[in-house]
Amino acid sequence: MAEQVRQGDVFFHPIEKLPKGAVLEKGRKIVAEGEATGHHHKLAEIDTDSRAEIFSLEDELFVKVQGSVVVNHQEHSTLAVDEGLYQIRIEREYTPEEVRRVLD
């Protein structure tokens, strides 16, 4: 199984299989967008034998990676993502009012 990887507030958490009912987001490559900056975390295939597919189920995202794939972001180093299946998780923070997603 692949290792968990992180780029800023976005985690690629390895999973064994896609959940039942997950739908392919055809053509989608952005896994997270910044609410304040407009920056984004975007998947990019390195060669023609590689593929990165994003699936959604309710408000969760999943990624299926085949071959050589990286994640790009305007303020972070490029991150290589190993072949495998991942659930996308966004870091959370505690405030006295609530536990919420970290805003970018």
Image (cartoon, rainbow, N blue to C red):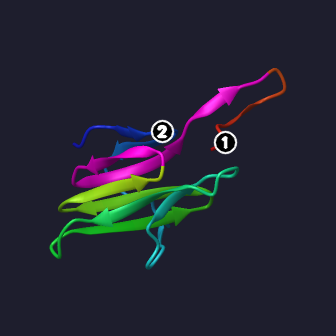
Task: List the residue tagged with mark 1.
Answer: 103
For image coordinates 43% across by 78% down, the residue present is 27
Residue nearest the observer in this picture, 102 or 38 = 38
For the record, the magenta segment spans 75-95
Q: Amino acid at mark 2?
A: Gly
Q: Secondary structure at mark 2?
A: loop
Task: Give residue 11's position: percent from left, percent from top.
Answer: 44, 41
Q: Secondary structure at mark 1?
A: loop
Q: Is residue 85 magenta?
A: yes
Task: Give residue 36's position: percent from left, percent from top.
Answer: 70, 50
Residue 19 got which mark? none
Lower position in the chain sequence, tag 2 or tag 1: 2
Q: Residues within 10 Å of mark 2 (few under 14, many from 20)?
A: few
Note whether 53 is above or below 31 in the view shown: below
**Would residue 81 be found to the left or right of residue 89 on screen?**
left
Q: Residues within 10 Å of mark 1 (few under 14, many from 20)?
A: some
Q: Is residue 33 magenta?
A: no
